Image: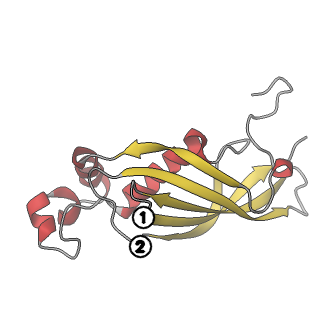
């Protein structure tokens, strides 16, 4: 919390359409991919190198949900420095290419739309497009999220 008792980060009033943010990086290992898959998405192409080679992915690939979880971690870690945290109210997600062992991920985000609430003057909605990219700049995930962001009190 800030000295005035406000959450730290950017408020709705601080944001502008077109504003961009960049996250830190995360290097993904095969062990991380397999551990996540074992708990949450136990399909052969996420669990076993040999089995994965015979699939559409032609090799071990992270679950899209793992990529989404890593994206969230990178956003929370400073890639979207919003006051009060990253509070989702819906959105769309796409995985245009697989995330692989050895990929070094980062997230680039852009504010697309800002809508102050008419019924709740203490907040508003922000539409944020976040592209998760690998070390080659290839997009592995696109998340367009509607986020609830507090207004400065």
Name, please, the residue furthest toward the top. 3
In front: 117, or 95?
95
Residue at image position (91%, 63%) is: 118
How many numbered tags mark residues here? 2
Binning the other alpha carbons within 10 Å of mark 1 as few (below 14), some (14 to 19) or many (20 upward) gives some
In the rendered structure, the answer to whether residue 149 lies left or right of residue 55 reads right
- Local SS, label 2: loop
Q: CA distance from mark 2 to mark 1?
A: 9 Å
Residue at the spot of label 1: 138
Q: Quadrant of the N terminus?
A: top right
Residue at image position (27%, 46%) is: 29
Image coords of residue 125 (percent x, y) = 77, 60
Image coords of residue 143 (percent x, y) = 55, 65
Q: Which mark is residue 117?
A: none
Binning the other alpha carbons within 10 Å of mark 2 as few (below 14), some (14 to 19) or many (20 upward) gives few
Disc 2 or 1, which lies upstream in sequence? 2
Q: Nearer the viewer, mark 2 or mark 1?
A: 1
- Inspect this view and state whether residue 130 appears: yes
Image coords of residue 131 (percent x, y) = 53, 62
Q: Quadrant of the C terminus?
A: top right
In front: 138, or 117?
138
In the rendered structure, the answer to whether residue 136 lies left or right of residue 35 reads right
In the rendered structure, the answer to whether residue 25 lies left or right of residue 58 reads right
Residue at image position (23%, 51%) is: 34
- Inspect this view and state whether residue 43 appears: no
Residue at the spot of label 2: 96
Which of the 4 quarters of the picture holds residue 64? bottom left
Image coords of residue 52 (percent x, y) = 16, 66
The answer to whether residue 56 is above or below residue 99 is: below
- Local SS, label 1: loop
């Amino acid at each position: 919390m800030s000295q005035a008792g406000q959450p730290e980060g950017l408020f709705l009033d601080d944001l502008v359409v077109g504003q961009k943010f960049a996250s830190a990086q995360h290097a993904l290992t095969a062990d991380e991919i397999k551990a996540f898959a074992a708990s949450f998405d136990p399909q052969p192409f996420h669990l076993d190198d040999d089995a994965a080679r015979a699939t559409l992915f032609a090799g071990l690939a992270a679950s899209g949900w793992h990529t989404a979880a890593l994206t969230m971690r990178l956003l929370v870690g400073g890639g979207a420095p919003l006051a009060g945290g990253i509070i989702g109210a819906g959105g769309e997600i796409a995985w245009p290419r697989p995330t692989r062992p050895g990929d070094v991920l980062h997230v680039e985000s852009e504010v697309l739309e800002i809508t102050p609430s008419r019924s709740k003057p203490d907040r508003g909605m922000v539409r944020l497009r976040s592209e998760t990219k690998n070390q080659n700049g290839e997009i592995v995930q696109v998340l367009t999220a509607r986020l609830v962001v507090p207004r400065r009190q």
